[in-house]
């Protein structure tokens, strides 16, 4: 049987301890006949077939890098002779491959708002994509972004997923650590500074509680010390917020399974909100921003609070810290909500979308 080729964005790293959100989801969804294509990594996930698209060094010029990546992917396509090519989050790469292989079935899965992306910035460009391939969005919010200015356009929705069976066993609410946790990229878009400011206002009034921020500017052990981080560290120290830096994904999940409260205070409209889904699945009581796709993901299983003004975020976290019964109820509701996004459900949906895409050609 011909394989399915799944093409990662060039910067994604398909490897344990290095994977970003897209690689994690692709890994969770990969089936026995799938081949994942991405940038070279020393030790890719061992349970999924992987082909490196760019041997040797990476050029510095972005356009040249994209062209070289497309050429390398095209060589793999010719060798593998797939039944379907799935491109993730890069409309420009999807269009380039479609020009090279005009009869090959393809899908484009969008993990972010496509309107700022090369190859999808205008309604005309997005209409051209939809004519050539099946477009899939990870949330209703992303679907609406793609369809803006295109009445009647059809965009399939395949939410990101989580493997509930593989998660660490969550502690019951009464036994959880009195920890207020942030996990993710430590950047302004994610509301990292708002988290620090809110915890600085709260911790003096919450004896026995601690606050922790896990993450760095990027995923992986090597991440730059940005001006934002340099300014945030002294503020975090003054606020009593611990900043242990980047931690592998499995350790982040362990922390979520023990923490009483997880906060996702994004300013940026999250296209989906995988961190929020993971926090709910791990049984933490969740505070999340009402922006982007986050409200669709959390439903009524979280408290919604914007990061600005900080007083509103602090009030939401403080009220939850003072209400153990509310935390326990959100823990139960969050686990039930997260089960709706289990990988088994997503794989069935993905299989149906793949069959439909192949049948169209």
Image: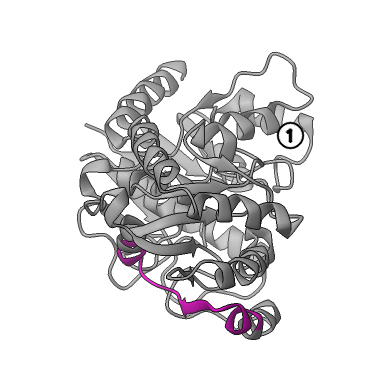
Residue at 41% x, 70% y: name it: 55
Is residue 186 found inside the magenta-colored segment of the image? no
Magenta stretch: give its range.
Answer: 235-252
The residue identified by callout 1 is 125
* 76 relative position to 186: left or right: left
State yes or no: residue 245 in magenta. yes
Give the residue drawn at x 50%, y 45%. Answer: 88
Q: Quadrant of residue 98?
A: top right
Q: Where residue 57 appears, x then y in whole percent?
A: 48, 77
> Residue 278, position in %: x, y?
39, 48
Question: Would residue 77 be seen by someone viewing this image from the given angle?
Answer: no
Which residue: 25% across, 39% down? 31
Q: Is residue 46 visible?
A: yes
Residue 326 at x, y percent in the picture: 44, 41
- Whether 236 is drawn above or below 338: the answer is below
Element type at marker 1? helix
Left or right position of 158 against 130: left
Left or right: 159 with respect to 137? left
Q: Residues within 10 Å of mark 1 (few under 14, many from 20)?
A: some
Q: Split into 4 quadrants, where in the image is the N terminus?
A: top left
For residue 116, above or below residue 252: above
Number of dots carrying numbers: 1
Which corner quadrant of the image does residue 80 belong to? Answer: top left
Q: Does residue 54 sit above or below 135 in this rendering?
A: below
- Which residue is nearer to you in this view: 147 or 216? 216
In the rendered image, residue 116, in percent from the top left (x then y), is placed at 74, 47
User: Closer to the camera, 99 or 333?
Assistant: 333
């Amino acid at each position: 049987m011909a394989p399915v080729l799944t093409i990662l964005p060039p910067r994604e790293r398909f490897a344990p301890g290095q994977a970003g959100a897209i690689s994690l989801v692709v890994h969770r969804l990969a089936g026995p006949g799938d081949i994942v294509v991405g940038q070279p990594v020393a030790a890719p996930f061992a349970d999924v077939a992987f082909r490196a698209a760019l041997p040797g060094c990476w050029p510095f010029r972005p356009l040249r890098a994209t062209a070289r990546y497309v050429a390398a992917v095209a060589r793999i396509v010719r060798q593998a002779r797939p039944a379907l090519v799935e491109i993730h989050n890069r409309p420009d790469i999807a269009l380039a491959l479609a020009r090279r292989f005009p009869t090959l079935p393809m899908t484009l899965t969008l993990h972010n708002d496509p309107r700022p992306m090369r190859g999808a910035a205008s309604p005309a460009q997005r209409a051209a994509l939809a004519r050539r391939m099946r477009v899939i969005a990870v949330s209703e919010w992303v679907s609406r972004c793609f369809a803006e200015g295109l009445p009647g356009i059809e965009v399939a929705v395949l939410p990101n997923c989580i493997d509930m069976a593989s998660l660490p066993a969550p502690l019951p609410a009464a036994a959880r650590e009195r920890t207020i946790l942030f996990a993710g990229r430590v950047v302004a878009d994610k509301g990292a500074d708002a988290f620090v400011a809110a915890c600085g206002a709260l911790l003096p009034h919450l004896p026995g509680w601690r606050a922790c921020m896990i993450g760095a500017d990027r995923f992986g052990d090597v991440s730059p010390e940005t001006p934002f981080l340099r300014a945030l560290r002294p503020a975090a120290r003054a606020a009593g917020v611990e900043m242990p830096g980047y931690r592998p994904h499995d350790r982040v999940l362990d922390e979520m399974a023990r923490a009483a409260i997880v906060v996702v205070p994004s300013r940026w409209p999250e296209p989906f909100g995988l961190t929020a889904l993971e926090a709910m699945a791990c049984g933490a009581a969740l505070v999340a921003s009402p922006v982007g796709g986050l409200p669709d993901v959390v439903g009524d299983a979280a408290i919604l609070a914007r990061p600005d003004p900080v007083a509103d975020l602090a009030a939401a976290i403080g009220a939850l810290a003072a209400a153990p019964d509310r935390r326990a109820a959100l823990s139960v509701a969050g686990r039930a909500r997260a089960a709706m996004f289990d990988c088994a459900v997503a794989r069935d949906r993905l299989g149906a979308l793949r069959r439909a895409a192949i049948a169209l050609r």
